[in-house]
Amino acid sequence: MPNWCEGELKVRGKKKNIIRFMEEGIQPMTPLAENLEKIKFTQGKYSTYAMSTCKKEYLIIEAGRAFIDEFMIEFENLESDETDILVEAFPARFAWKINAEKLQDIAKKYNIDIKILGFECGGQFNQLVEIVDKEIIKNEIITYKDYQWECPFSKMGG
């Protein structure tokens, strides 16, 4: 069983690109790794939304052993939807460490930016990954002399 590098996965982009990433790039699974029906956004009169349900994991396809645990996304239906840049954030975890190159491939495929600061208390490191305009601008491993004292959220991950 791996240690988990956990943090808040942020995605930034146009509404249509974030929806496409969620519908095509995330696979709902049961705790026993059985695939479930894909995420579908519901178009309402005033908003477009999707949310997780309990007892599921959400595999980030093409990111290795990486999961989103739960989420709620609601976009207001606005006339500026085609031009507005939005940010959504999800609790996420990656086995051992974050693979920046795989996230870069996802960012290119869905035309989104991705950012995560992951915490791994077992290995006593943090990892900051940021992909903007399809380029990795940060992929840093952060260590501390005294991880438990100096690191914010020092009990996350592991």
Image (tube, rainbow, N blue to C red):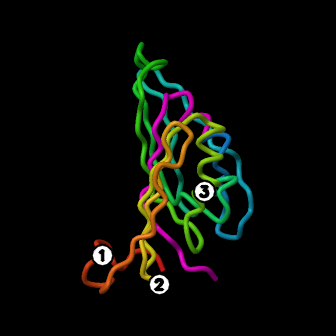
Q: Residue at x 32, y 73 (%)?
A: 153
Provide residue 130's location: percent of width, then percent of height: 46, 51
Range drawn in magenta: 1-21
Q: CA distance from mark 2 to mark 1?
A: 13 Å
Among the two numbered marks 2 and 3 on one chain, the one whose residue lies closer to the N terminus: 3
- Dot 1: element: loop
Q: Residue at x 45, y 69 (%)?
A: 141
Q: Is residue 82 above or below residue 154?
A: above
The residue type indicated by label 3 comes to Tyr
**On the image, numbered disc 2 is attached to which residue?**
122
The residue type indicated by label 1 comes to Cys
**On the image, numbered disc 3 is attached to which residue?**
58
Depth check: give the residue in front, 130 or 152.
130
Asked where in the image residue 94 lies, by quadrant, the reply is: bottom right
- Mark 3: few, some, or many residues within 10 Å (few <14, many ≥20)? many
Q: CA distance from mark 1 to mark 3?
A: 28 Å
**On the image, numbered disc 1 is attached to which residue?**
151
